[in-house]
Image (spheres, grey):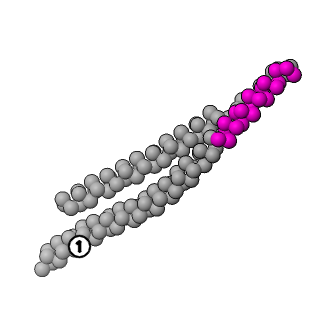
Amino acid sequence: MSLNNSVDIYLESEQEQIQTLNKYIHDIHQQLVDYEESLTPECSNDDNDSENNIPKIMDLLNEVADINEAAKILRPINLQLDDLQSGLTDCLKSLQQTIDLLKLERDIKILTERNEGMSSEED
């Protein structure tokens, strides 16, 4: 039974790592969303005074330029995150297959032991 326990411990450890990686990806994605939202300019329609409109327009243009620069910075980061997520997804699929195989091996061993036990009882 020690093999079964060690396989179970290994499986639990791998599943915890999967959950940790998924949480890490979610946290990074949420930080990017929050950052992008913080760059969105706010527009006020309260003041229609033409003297105040020019500075407001200039401020908005500066914010748009800042957003454009931030977007240039964020694009490669998003691509890297997409690549990372794709790689992690492939890794998780492979890991799940390994876990499934280990479970099958454990089940086969248990059934084999039971079968051998029943065979020896019949003899």
Mainly helix, strand or loop, the magenta region?
helix
Q: In the drawing, does residue 11 fall left or right of residue 18?
A: left
Name the quadrant of the N terminus: bottom left
Question: In the rendered structure, does residue 86 fall within the stretch colored magenta?
Answer: no
Mark 1 surroundings within 10 Å by alpha-carbon count, few (fewer than 14), some (14 through 19), many (20 or more): few
Q: Secondary structure at mark 1?
A: helix
The residue under the point 63% across, 46% down is 72
Residue 54 point in image, percent of width and height: 82, 25
Name the residue tied to disc 1.
112
- Residue at 67%, 38% (x, y): give it: 67
Q: Is residue 118 visible?
A: no
* Horizontal side, residue 119 vs residue 95: left or right: left
Give percent across and percent down for residue 75. 60, 49
Figure quadrant of the C terminus: bottom left
Residue positioned 24% across, 69% down in the render: 109
Magenta segment boundaries in residue numbering: 50-69
In this rendering, is residue 48 above or below 70?
above
Front position in the image: 28 or 12 = 28
Q: Position of residue 50 (x, y in %)?
A: 87, 22
Q: Is residue 108 above or below residue 67?
A: below
- Label total for image: 1
